Image: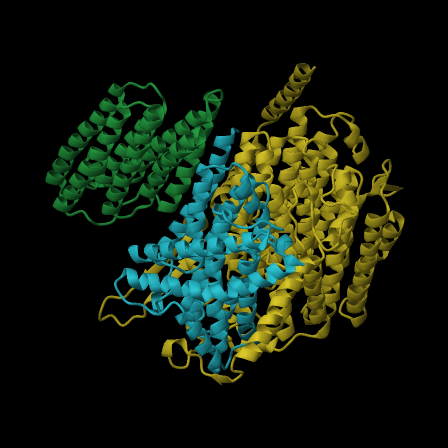
Amino acid sequence: MKDLYFDTAHMLGTAVLLLSFALLFQRRISGVINTFALQATMLALAAAWQAFVQDAPHLYVTALVALLFKAVAIPVALHRIVRLLMIHRTVETALSIGLTMVVGVALVTLAILLVLPVTSDSAALTRENLALALSVVLLGLLMMITRRNAVTQVIGFMSLENGLILAAIGVSGMPLVVEMSVAFAVMVAFIIFGIFFFQIRERFDTLDLHYLESFRGERS
Amino acid sequence: MTGVLTQLLQMMLVLGAAPLLTGVVRLAKARLVGRRGPSPIQPYRDLLRLLRKEAVVAENASWLFRVTPYMVFAALWLAASLVPTFTTGLALEPTADLIALVALLASARFMTALAGLDVGTSFGGIGSSRDMMIASLAEPAMLLVIFTVSIVAGSTALAEVAHHMREAEVGLRVSLAMALVALIMVALAENARIPVDNPATHLELTMVHEAMVLEYSGRHLALIEAAGMLKLLFFLSLIACIFAPWGMAGPGEPPAAAAVGLLAWGGKLLLGAGALALLETSIAKMRVFRVSEFLAGALLLGVLAVIFLYVSRGL
Amino acid sequence: MLIPILIALVPLLALGPATLIAPRSAAAHWGVYAGTAALSGLIAAAALSHLLLESSPQHAGLPIGLPWLTARFRLDSLSAFFLLVVNGGAAAAAAYGIGYGRHEREPERVLPAFPLFIAAMNLTLLADDAFSFLVSWETMSLTSWVLVLATHREPDTLRAAQLYLIMASGGTLLLLLAFGVLAQVTGGYDFDSIRTSALTPGAAALALALGFLGTGSKAGLVPLHAWLPLAHPAAPSHVSALMSGVMTKVALYGMVRILFDLVGEVPWWWGGIMMALGGATAVIGVLFATMEQDLKRLLAYSTVENIGIVVTGLGLAAAFRDNGMNEIAGLAFAAALLHILNHAVFKSLLFLGAGAVATATGTRDLGRLGGLIGRMPQTAFAMLVGAGAIAALPPLNGFVSEWLLFQAVLKGPLLPQWELKIAAAVVAALLALAAALAASCFVRAFGIAFLGRPRSPEAAAAVEVEPAMRWTLLALAALCLLLGVLPMLALTPMGRLGEAVIGAAAVRTDSSWLWLTPPAAGGNSYGGVIVLAVIAGFGVLTRIGIHNLASRRLRRAAPWACGFDAPVAPAQYSASSFAQPLRRVFASLVRAEERVEMPEPGDLRAARFASSWRDASWDLLYQPVGAAVGWLSLTLNQLQFLTIRKYLSLMFAALVGLLFLVAVTQ
């Protein structure tokens, strides 16, 4: 029965990772937001499952936080922002989507190569879980650098946070404080970025950071 | 001897079941969007109607054009007969190598694409060229799925794979889940289903497979359509055989076990048909040049599946 | 069998110079082509008998070359296998030449060099010391260069020939250095003393790198491949078939000889590098083949792909052998060798077929061909078989070697090094991608050239070529089927070769001829005969069923084409439009660009569309190197205008430098 516990945990972790790839694959902003909501739901499920397996009730709180804020509140708010600012148009990529995904797979391989030697004596569960979490973090970073639009960059940042939480819930005995602070950090980032959007919108009439660069004289 | 009998039975079974499967998918799709839909045996009637009609062949079509439907149908029929459905004790089992099966499908596609170019119309060309583009990405993705499965099962022979998946303690594996998703993506592309292609459309520019076989009529078209139905059955049986071989009878088991296997197979096909119909009604078709990204995703998923296999086993 | 082969080489060497007496006569034509075909056939038979019957290598020394050296020759199973491949291909090309040579405008430019070229390839395979190896190798390069120049009236030939000469000299230089490194310990240039001498790891790595690059540049390894698609197609078609189908195999022989025999111990990481380079070569080669518009250049790019597949197999063999997994190494090695044989067969077939098309229509531009299947039915059938074989479709021969190679790649996860484990997964993806793209490429090549409607008056007026050419094509097509159906025919003789070079054969010699069951593949099997019989059986069943069930009426009518009236030839899909989806998907790899020029509304100009692609190795490797060489020569040029004092000081500096080197190395 223990195998089934581990396997299910892996499956949920993998689902989070695959949704990271799905984020890279999306071309429409609403699609990106919905995929992010789905990823947060998967994360909540993974947390709940870990709470059940590790018999650690505080992880249920983490799951609830992930579900309420990341899977519901933030996507709804982002949808509102997108509607308000009228930026439904397609995601602008700095790198072609196919190439981004190839880089993504290379990053996942790198994550695995990094994690495996370090954790060679720990259980397969932690090993796989850490590899998955690190991959999600790296893919979040990749998303932030390959997308020009500020909304998608925020989502990249939050999916990176998802990776951190995934790593945290996989290790038994991690105190609740960590998760709460991580979730809080996301909220703060969200608010900051929210204000930031309106600032850019006011000044330059667009959310494309490209214009910001030209304003700073980085591009002609 | 029983091997030969079960093989013959299987040949007839796939031939008889393939149109029914397509009919069920169409019915399910119609019901899901609130139409009454045709009866599930409508594909049989369609095929019979086509067989009774005369074949109209373009003036400048070569022998290749007329031979292709027979070869394509024979290849797909063979492929579908090789996949263990209700039992693994088939006479042609040694030829059911996964790599050979992929190559068999590739041969069928090679001939179809050539036939699309034979008459020299722009529709045939557009279909052939796009179909080959899709296949160029779908085939490697499928081979990587095979790579993953064969590392887990230690063999590329289908019967061996099914046996291993059923008997050994495989468990829920991350790699296998990725391989399954990749295989489903490949199957959607290979069968010209939504979101890659639309099997129901004859609109000029959205079609890939239908454009390629546009010039066929009468018995030739019947063969091509039947081959398409067999392909759908082949992929559903393949997915069931690799990822859900439960209920399948082993070689030399009593007829009762085979009957159970038959029922299980029917159930799996129904489930697959329902899932396909649900998927097709809930998503939209992609632009042709998004398909390459979709299939590149399947290919990379295959690579990830292999790499994650190393994670769970250790490097 | 070594002595008879050497004796047979004497008339082959003499044939070429003899034609100089009357180069345009029918006697010269028949003498060269029929004579070469007969002699090559004899040598091939002798090589086969050695492969089957003899187990120990044979030696011979001839007092030719430098006065104090004897030229050494050696016939072992490795050279016997390659002799079989080379002379089989040469015999086919020569037999084809009996018909094709009549269309030659300047036969005196082809006839003298043709037998010399073949003899030089033979001598390269037999050479047993570095000196005769390099002399034969260079003779092979120079004679093929002369043959490329036979078409000197065509505009691109001169540039291709110039580049070919530069690349060939560069490759020979690398080989010369490689042999220098190999011989450093004992100073012995014969292969026996190189084999026995022990190299330091550093020297071995250097020799590996030099030998690999020297032979790889000749074989067409990416990124050194750019000369190949220019030079191979420029020659007359039967010479193109020799260069692509056979000469690249001599280069691979050199690679196997230096890596697996002379150096001996190939470290696993070097195998990994070979796998990666081979995989990249396969994909890039076939991608360019898919874009190419010129039929023969398309085939040359596809040669690059196949070389990549073989090098991948060799790399796998090296990686497995270094880890002590000899069984699987034998499997990978056999896959590579079988692919060498298969490629020699189907690439010769395809090049000779392209020559037939060029003879019949006067063009090899896919944009001017079409509809040839009705006018050249036998050529078309043979080409269809060749296209199917190179696209790795069962039951043809290309599939067997790809199947074996995949079986070896599937064992990659057993390798202990994580780099190789991951490389195995990536290489599997690359090989599968290359195979699928090859199918796309040859659907395009065959479909555009032979199917549809003729795209030019020449294609519409084409007639079938003469019997000597047709029969050669059909014989090669039959060989494609035979090797695909009964691969054991080829693999059984190769068993001894695998044992000699790698230490394990892929198949047991006593196993059934019907089934290909490599022990290392863990119970997986492929039965070519069974597959053919089953496919044929299903086809016959279908045919019978349809004839009894369906209406037999058939009516010929205008194409339907969604109701468009009378489709005309320019409305068909062209070679460029067929390649468009893949050109877009891989745009960044092939540097594809599309430009649409749409006139403003009211403007009556025609809209224009242009698409282009570019081999990136030009911009990234060839031009920078060319520019560097130019800069260097300009800079060194200044050395001609120095004062005597400066010249003296240069010499003094050189002397002191060398003395310092001696002091340090002691």
Query: Left or right: where does residue C206 sit relative to residue A86?
Result: right
- Residue A132 or residue C131, whichever sits in front: A132
Image quadrant assignment for residue C217: top right
Q: Dividing the image into 4 quarters, which one contains the C terminus of chain A?
A: top left
Image quadrant assignment for residue A192: top left
- Residue C59 or residue B84, whichever sits in front: B84
Where does the image place residue B304, in percent across and percent down from the top left? Answer: 45, 39
- Residue A157 or residue B220, whichever sits in front: B220
Q: Colour of chain B?
A: cyan
Image point (79%, 29%), residue name:
C196
Where C36 falls versus A53 (above or below)?
below
Where C272 falls versus B30 (above or below)?
above
Where does the image place residue B287, in percent across and percent down from the top left? Answer: 33, 57
Where A212 falls versus A182 (above or below)?
below
Judge whether residue C592 can be spotted in this image: no
Query: Left or right: where does residue A126 sit relative to residue C136?
Result: left
Where does the image place residue C193, in percent across and percent down from the top left? Answer: 80, 31
- Residue C655 or residue C251, whichever sits in front: C251
Q: Dividing the image into 4 quarters, which one contains the N terminus of chain A?
A: top left
Q: Colour of chain C?
A: yellow
Judge whether residue B83 can be spotted in this image: yes
Q: Colour of chain A?
A: green
Image point (62%, 39%), residue name:
C316
Image point (57%, 71%), residue name:
C542
Where does the image place residue B279, in percent across and percent down from the top left? Answer: 34, 54
Query: Left or right: where does residue C495 sit relative to residue C615?
Result: right
Extreme residue toward the left, this view: A202
